[in-house]
Amino acid sequence: MKQPLLDVIELKKYYPITRGVIRQREIATIRAVDGVTFQIGDGETVGLVGESGCGKTTTGQLVLGLERPTAGQVSFKGVVLSSLTPPQLRKMRSHFQMVFQDPFSSLSPRMRVGDLIGEPLHVHDLAHGWERRRQVLEVMDAVGLVKEHYDRYPHEFSGGQRQRVAIARALVLKPRLIVADEPVSALDASIQSQILNLLMDLQQEFQLTYLFIAHNLNVIYHVCDRVLVMYLGKIVESAEVTTLFEKPRHPYTQALIAAKPELDATRRKKKLLLKGAVPSASAVPSGCAFHPRCFYHLREECREVGPRLVDIGDGHFVRCYYAQSGGTTLTPTNIELKKG
Amino acid sequence: MQKLLQVKDLKTNFPLPRAMVKAVDGISFAIAQGETLGLVGESGSGKSVTALSILRLVPSPGEIQSGEIWFHDQNLLQLSEADMRRVRGRGIAMIFQDPTAYLNPLMTVGSQVMEIIQVHEGLKKAHAREKTVEILDRVGIPSPAIRVDDYPHQFSGGMRQRILIAITVASNPDLLIADEPTTALDVTIEAQILDLLRRLQSETGSSILLITHDLAVIAEMCQQVAVMYAGRIIEAGATEDILSSPLHPYTQGLIQALPRFGQRKKRLTVIEGNIASASNPPPGCRFHPRCPIPKEICSREPPPLIEVDGDHQVNCYEYVS
């Protein structure tokens, strides 16, 4: 098996909730990410979907080493990130970059666009002076910004152009992996398509690998090869994108897809209205975390034990007793990386 | 069909020190009894200002410059402030994108709903409380008799939107204006809220003006739709017609720009350029700098509104015969 670019094994991130000023007691734990395992192959685009609070963003931050995991490990090209010293990690970080949702708050208003884009080169001590300027202009050209934009400030730009600046800033270090956290959800529809096209073009041009975090299922469907669906810190289903959308097996995925408002009347399905809202990550239900909202007939083990993520064939993993008939259990050693 | 609301040539301006922002620049539309009209457009197109103009709640320095807003048999723009206050709530109520901003954090949700019932129906407190519990139940708050005494922060985003809807339901309005009611919500919660709005509408027969940027929400909720661009309505008609055969190049672009099934990984259609600025809009047709099929006249004269079969209207020279 070819080595994956990114290998995430049993990743966990717990945040303690404490009470008391002098003697702090831990009264509860938020399980933001609770045992997430997945791999991303070189050049693949993997989507991460789920509703607010499911741990998508935290997973992205753990992957980039911006947060320290409580348990589990992330390896990039076979190197385990937590084994690196801070300077080594910093060096490694130039290979993976992040694009954030809000291009209004992720860019410093007091820096010129050219300096913003060139800042990573400065931080990593890779290029200076005219050489830095040359590299910045090159990447500006790649994202559809022109020379004249170099000395302008972010406030002079529209949302779509700012997102181009943010993408240029991520791209300037020539990374292998880009974690894009809701990169188009703050943008209007006519601008959204420009940025999605840009991201797809850049992937071709620079052989990029994407971890694409989004809640918009249409966007995920359009750009991704494979999708991971998260619910309360766990992956509940993962499959190749067409399989996941055509034959979703986990009730949560089924509800998500059915709930999506549909432009095309012929594709409109009967809504599976889920009861209630996502429970708090500090009080995760026992057994299968989804069981209080599940619309299937619950078994005893749904309430008490909770299923594992199991391959039901062709790299389609589901964390649900109903969907699992004759599958193999997923352990870190028997995941087959499926290349699209 | 009886028109409940009729807006005629409405203009709302925001005079700023160095510019006059024509946020709404001469729009006309009507909503029939029991109908849902969708107002769709991108940020800055004037959707929300239109809604606030109908309620005469345009924030300063904005002001309604001209036009008529007929609701039942009265022109709202000619009512006294006292009469207008009677229209708000009982006649026309509004819900917003961010319910948290419109709920008082220091009052229990019950008292916020009860306040409305007492004002509008003059009920005694005990009776009003009973009615409040009933309304909370109708909008789908679980165990309403207990939750009536909870504060807004004890509810989730979707539940807060339900409470905001409960407050509007309490006054039983003829017209509900919903400004991006589900934009801040997750998709499964969005489906619940849209379902609730549909159900309440079929129970009460009220009309809805639904403002959104999401064409898919329009497709599922509205019989009629009006598309706004830079302060003007550029196309209007039955939702089915507009979604299946859009006429205006902007509407066409907007629909084609959306990712769809069966088109995976293909390049998406793009509307070139950026949204026209409302403070310095291009002359003539405001869409002409981004238009794929501009004519010479488009940059000089604003296009007329053209009726194309029945009630499908479009604001574009392409259809001038």
Image (cartoon, grey):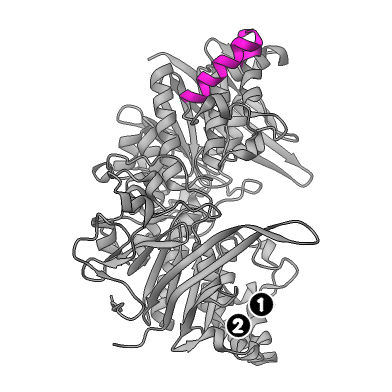
Residue A66 location, quadrant: bottom right
Quadrant, the C terminus of chain A: bottom left
Question: Is residue A187 toward the left or the right of residue A220 in the image?
Answer: right
In the image, B220 versus B65, the foreground residue is B220
Residue located beneath label 1 in the image: A114
Q: Which residues are magenta?
A: B117-138
Q: Quadrant of residue A105?
A: bottom right
Mark 1: secondary structure = helix
Badge 1 local density, few (<14 within 10 Å), some, or many (20+)? Answer: many
* Number of the label disc, if any, that sits on residue A326: none
Amino acid type, residue under disc 1 in the picture: Gly
Say how many tags the image has: 2
Q: Quadrant of the N terminus of chain A?
A: bottom left
Q: Residue at x 44, y 83 (%)?
A: A206
Residue A174 position in % (x across, y down): 52, 85
Going from the N terminus, do you reach mark 2 or mark 1 first? 1
Asked whether disc 2 touches disc 1, contact meaning CB atoms under 8 Å apart, the reply is: yes
Q: Is residue B3 magenta?
A: no
- The correct choice, above or below, for A257 with respect to A209 in the image is above
The reply to whether label 2 and label 1 mark residues of one chain is yes
Q: Main secondary structure of the magenta part?
A: helix
The image shows residue B164, relative to residue A320, as above or below, that is above
Residue A129 sits in quarter: bottom right
Against A174, residue A99 (above or below) is: above
Residue B137 lies in the magenta stretch: yes
- The residue under the point 75% across, 35% down is B61
| Residue occupied by mark 2 | A136
